[in-house]
Image (spheres, rainbow, N blue to C red):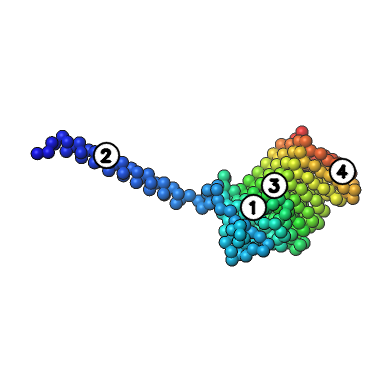
Amino acid sequence: MANPQKRGSSRLAECGARNRITRFLLVQAVLALILVSMPAGGDPAGATYYVGPDGSDADNGGAAAPWKSFAKAMGVLKAGDTLIVKNGAYYETLAVTVSGVPGAPVTIRAEHDGQAVIDGQGARRTLHINRKKDIIVEGLVFRNSNYHGVAVQDSRWIKVKRVSTYGSAASRAGFLIYRSSHVLLEDCASMGHSDNIYDIYESDHTTLRRCWVHIPDDSSGIVLYGADNSIVENCIAYAGPTSFAGANGFAVWAANYILTTDNNALYGNVSVNSPSNGFFHASATHMIK
């Protein structure tokens, strides 16, 4: 006859094993549910795609089979993804129609800095970011826009690095930051015929770092206009020999309908040959260091 004590111990061990298996399966089910419920593209290590002047939108967007158009790419990109722009000229607006998420931005960058050129031919916009967030743009050249060269409007957490613009439409900016927040312009360059070549307009927490501007006529170089809590540091504004008398290197000001231009700081900037003011302000509430 079997020992009742041993039989009881065996049953307890069997129950313990079943409980451990049940707990393991429960944990696995919870993890699976979490993964399924995560937003698409939430992984910061997203996919990498390519676009090239000789590509085809029928291809898969890989390095050896790039897409042809930015429109195709925008239909595929999601948070955490990177679009690499191969060398050459593109005759299409780069209209960013997707957003990233914190920690997983959408990145659009030149394969080689300065060798991927978006040309508006005077008939199209070149870069337009409207109502988007968590976007990085790097290494591209934007020329001959019929609008602003780089336009960031009603957007936040945007980084534009090593980008240059020229040939924008008359009275339009090389870089326009409009009603946006937490935008970084770093190591950028611009020249053009506009009221303000870098126009930071009714925005907050904008940073310009190591940017360069050539002022060819009566434009102002870098302007904070109704902008708050922004920093301009180590930038250079150069006025050429054809600059008009009203050209300013750097300006901080507020219009009658804009109540504040508060808590802005300028550090280590250089204004060269400005025929009007190297540094100009028309607001009692700003701060310049």
Which one is closest to the eye, mark 3 or mark 4?
A: 3
Task: Compare residues 64 and 261 and report the one nearer the observer.
Answer: 64
Q: Position of residue 111 (x, y in %)?
A: 67, 53
Q: Which mark is residue 274?
A: 4
Task: Compare residues 273 and 253 and report the one nearer the observer.
Answer: 273
The residue depicted at 77 percent of the width and 62 percent of the height is 122
* Mark 3 surroundings: few (<14), some (14-19) or many (≥20) residues within 10 A: many
The amino acid type, in three-letter code, at marker 4 is Ser
Q: Position of residue 57 (x, y in %)?
A: 61, 64
The residue depicted at 72 percent of the width and 39 percent of the height is 231
Q: Is residue 266 left or right of residue 46?
A: right
Indicate which disc, 1 or 4, sits on the residue closer to the N terminus.
Answer: 1
Indicate which disc, 4 or 2, sits on the residue closer to the N terminus.
Answer: 2
Q: Is residue 58 above or below residue 130?
A: below
Question: Distance from label 1 to label 3 (Cα)?
Answer: 11 Å
Label 1 residue SS: strand
Q: Which residue is mark 1?
A: 108
Q: Which mark is residue 16?
A: 2
Q: Which residue is mark 3?
A: 161
The amino acid type, in three-letter code, at marker 1 is Ile
- Residue 226 visible in the snapshot: no
Q: Position of residue 181 (x, y in %)?
A: 66, 45
The amino acid type, in three-letter code, at marker 3 is Lys
Indicate which disc, 1 or 2, sits on the residue closer to the N terminus.
Answer: 2
